[in-house]
Image (cartoon, rainbow, N blue to C red):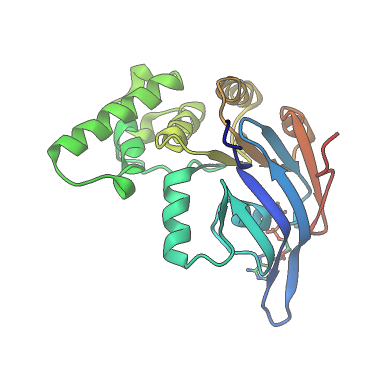
Amino acid sequence: MTVPVPPVVEFRQAGLTYPGPPPVTALRPCDLTVDRGEYVTVVGPSGSGKSSFLNLAGLLDAPTTGRYLFDGVDTAQLPDRERTALRGRRIGFVFQSFHLLPHRTAVENVALAMLYASPSGRRAAAARRERAEEALVEVGLGHRLRTTTDRLSGGERQRVAIARALVNRPALVLCDEPTGNLDSATAESVLTLLDGLHADGLTVVLITHDPQVAARGLRTVAIRDGELHGTERG
Ligand SMILES: Nc1ncnc2c1ncn2[C@@H]1O[C@H](COP(=O)(O)OP(=O)(O)OP(=O)(O)O)[C@@H](O)[C@H]1O
């Protein structure tokens, strides 16, 4: 008998209203399901609610209405501490501006993401470094392991950020305008890397204002005035 695999993301009439005053409904109650191995893009103009969606999907915020099941766990009622722990273990983030420590090496930046869920001690530290190196090799940066990130190009920095997002083998990688700070050739190589990771089974949700970037997803959801459109399967 096979055990059914829960979706990675399951919004059930999940919505987000900032309390204000005045209250602002940034995301109206919506349903959205993202299954394991999908590549979904979310596209919308400035102010449409993309960051609010990211905050919910990435367990940075809890819905103010409805439910959010992440990887089968009902998160709406989770205490903050547990939501944070789940996020640290199971979600990798890739941001437009990389969010790396500039004076640390690529390996150190990636290994730091594992501190949270790893025991202390020299042996654990060595294991973290080894796993960080593996993740960096996976994104094509095996030749930059010990370079501090302030000496890397924009594309290389984003690869370090992607390695950091992958290093805990997350259920979901959430990308927020991952090519927003890159020239078009570098952006293309980062998108090609994401295509390859998805082909290897990674679940990706990518948020962008750029319809061309959004077209890289296998399924695109539009967001306008806080409302998700196109969430039903074709
Ligand atoms: N903390 C907050 N308190 C109140 N209103 C907010 C807050 N954050 C965002 N909003 C409002 O919610 C709506 C959606 O904002 P959001 O930042 O999610 O849009 P966005 O699509 O990410 O925009 P951008 O592309 O410009 O970053 C906007 O009307 C915004 O003004």
Image x and y of residue 156, in percent: 46, 27
Residue at screen point 58% across, 42% down:
174
* 41 to the left or right of 139: right
The quadrant of the image that shows the C terminus is top right
Furthest residue in direction bottom, as rendered? 21
Residue at screen point 29% across, 36% down:
108
* 227 to the left or right of 124: right
Residue at screen point 36% across, 18% down:
142
Q: Toward which corner of the image does residue 85 lie, by quadrant?
A: bottom left
Image x and y of residue 69, in percent: 61, 53
Seen in the picture, residue 75 relative to 123 is either above or below; the reply is below
Seen in the picture, residue 109 relative to 189 is either above or below; the reply is below
Furthest residue in direction front, as rendered? 1
Ligand 1 image-quadrant field: bottom right
* 199 to the left or right of 230: left
Q: Toward which corner of the image does residue 62 lie, by quadrant?
A: bottom right
Image x and y of residue 86, in percent: 46, 52
